Structures are given as C-alpha cells and as structure tokens.
Amino acid sequence: MKLYVGNLSFDTSDQDLEQLFSQSGTVNSARIITDRDSGRSRGFGFVEMSSKSEGNTAIDEFNGKEINGRSLVVNEARQREDQNSGGNRGNYGGGGGYGGNKNRGGRTNRW
C-alpha cells in the first residue's frame, strides 16, 4: 500500500521516513519529494508498505502525530491525474479553467 506523507519537516530524509514507518511494518520504499531546481525537500513524500493492513496501521499511528514539531498528514496515496488533460494545461502549471488557450479566460488577445 502506497502512502502519502505530508507536512514533513524540511530536514527529514528518506532514511528518517523509512525508519519512522518501519515501526508499523515492513517498508518497501520511502522517498521524500524534492524540488527539481534547488534539491530541497518539498515537505512531503511517499512510503510504500508491504501490505494494506500495515499501511492502515501506519495511517492510524502517524496521521496527526507530531514529529519534529509538525503534525503529519498520512493517507493512502491517490493515483496521479494525467498532466496533459485540459489542452495546454501541462505547459502552464495547471492552468485549470482557462479553456486550453495559452492566455487566461479562453480569449485570444489581439494587441
């Protein structure tokens, strides 16, 4: 079972995450998500537990628990949505609701 772990301290490492969640069962993988430009932690990560029951145990144990002064958010990870749906959405950081045009409001600017 893959878990989303949010509101992590920016100092948390992959190893810290694995060590923490191993208290609830077997951890197949633990990964902190980092900014691709700076390499700094983005404050969240993913942990893959070896079974659904161990994942549920980890959710019960760690969701809302304070670690390093921060209250963790732990839940089952959801499948990532297709980044290219909605026209040019993938090129404009989401651009939700702009009708797929490169400018806002779905209109063509003519200057």
Image (cartoon, rainbow, N blue to C red):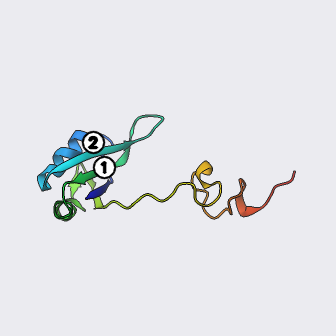
Who's the residue at 37% across and 44% down the image? 33
Which residue carries the number 2 mark? 12
| Residue type of the residue flagged with mark 1 | Leu
Which residue extends farthest right? Answer: 111
For label 2, the SS is loop
Of residues 106 and 78, the one drawn nearer to the viewer in this rendering: 78
Q: Which image quadrant for residue 53?
A: bottom left
For label 1, the SS is loop
Residue 40 % position (x, y): 39, 37
| Residue type of the residue flagged with mark 2 | Thr
Which residue extends farthest top? Answer: 38
Residue 29 % position (x, y): 24, 46
Of residues 105 and 55, the one drawn nearer to the viewer in this rendering: 55
Q: CA distance from mark 2 to mark 1?
A: 7 Å
Q: Residues within 10 Å of mark 1 (few under 14, many from 20)?
A: many
Which residue carries the number 1 mark? 8
